[in-house]
Image (cartoon, grey):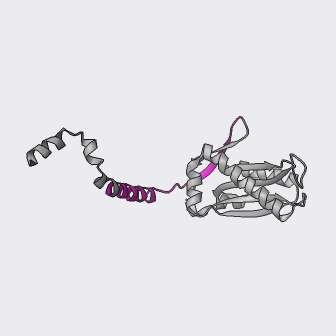
Amino acid sequence: MRDRNKEEREKEPWLARGLKPENFLPGLLIGFLLGLLLDLSAPRISGVTKAKSSRNGKHQLGSAASSSGGTGDELKMVLVVRQDLKMGAGKIASQCAHAATGMYADLLQSNRSILRQWEQYGQAKIVLSCKNQQEMNKLKEEADRCGLPTFVVADAGRTQIKAGSKTVLAIGPGWKFLANLV
């Protein structure tokens, strides 16, 4: 009887033998733990994010060597709100959310690694203000020169602000030392 079972098992494809219910859960657990181990042991990126303008005006990130050797916990996003529009607190919160999610969506397409690293270290964000559109434009130009990605929110005009008004500028995520230069 044992010889017959052994012969039947040898005729089964090797994959079918491994996919038995008694092997599934231990295999799943081992795979999960190995995945965590490999993910946590991956080397961190140490470089400066560089933004390149594409034809449609969006920015794509690349990586270059950094003399300061930045680490992932030094990444942050800066949201710059225009003061002259006199938006209410709820409107400012909404526009900052649009800026952060807009930048996130752009970077999902162009550089997931910087997003992943930013996510792993808490997604630091800081909200600042500027006086007017001209000051916002200068900040955007400076961020572009430093190689930081930017995203500008243009309001839809449904509530407090005229349609098309530039309300918030998102800069980064990028290395804190670069964002501080802006």
The single residue placed furthest to the front in the displayed view is: 1
* In-image side of 14 versus 74 (left or right): left
Residue 78, position in %: x, y?
A: 72, 59
Closer-to-camera residue (52/29): 29
Viewer can see residue 27? yes
In the picture, measured across the screen, residue 84 lies left or right of residue 66, that is right
Q: Is residue 39 rendered magenta in the image?
A: yes
Left or right of 99: which side holds 8? Answer: left
Location of residue 124 with respect to 100 vertically, above or below: below
Residue at 82% x, 50% y is 137
Q: Please say if 51 is above or below 22.
A: above
Q: Nearer the viewer, residue 101 or 148?
A: 101
As for residue 40 lying within the magenta part, the answer is yes
The C terminus: image quadrant: bottom right
Disc tally is 0
Q: Residue at x 68, y 43 (%)?
A: 59
Residue 92, quarter of picture: bottom right
Rendered residue at 77%/51% (across/down): 140
Q: Position of residue 160 (x, y in %)?
A: 89, 55
Q: Which residues are magenta?
A: 26-55
Report whether residue 64 is seen.
no
Closest to the observer, 84 or 87 = 87
- In this rendered view, identify the residue nearer to me: 139 or 35: 35
Q: Residue furthest top?
A: 55
> Residue at position x 59%, y 46% from top?
111
Q: Position of residue 139 (x, y in %)?
A: 79, 54
Expressed as whole percent of the image width and height from the top left, the position of residue 102 reads 71, 49
